[in-house]
Image (tube, rainbow, N blue to C red):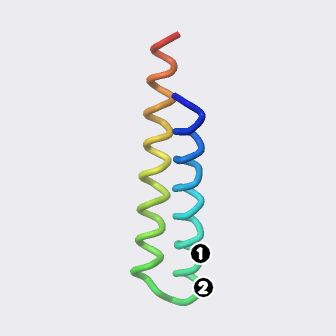
Amino acid sequence: MGIGDKMKNAAEEAKGKVKAKTGDATDDRDLQAEGETEESVAALKQAGEKAKDAFKK
């Protein structure tokens, strides 16, 4: 997993957290759900890349 992929996934996860918190603060359930989804997808990508790295070694 390249450093670029790690940074991209971390940025996506952070963006999802911000959306989720903003949705929660403004009582916008759609925005909150969208943020939580983005956060989860980024975390899964990160886990998949880590698994690939483990098999390479």
Other residues around mark 1 within 10 Å, as few (<14) / some (14–19) / many (≥20): some
- Label 1 close to label 2 by CB (< 8 Å): yes
Q: Amino acid at mark 2?
A: Ala
The structure residue drawn at horizontal position 59% and vertical position 75%, both measured from the top left corner, is: 21
Q: Which residue is mark 2?
A: 25
Find residue 21 and name its label: 1
Residue farthest along the bottom direction in this orientation: 26
At numbered mark 2, what does the secondary structure look like: helix, strand or loop? helix
Query: Please, which residue is most extreme toward the front here?
Result: 4
What's the amino acid at mark 1?
Lys
Residue 31, given in percent of the width and then of the height, sits at 44, 78
Whether 44 is drawn above or below 19: the answer is above
In the rendered image, residue 18, in percent from the top left (x then y), is placed at 59, 70
Front in this rendered view, residue 1 or 27: 1
* Image-quadrant location for residue 4: top right
Residue 40: x percent and y percent? Answer: 45, 54
In this rendering, the answer to whether 9 lies above or below 16 is: above
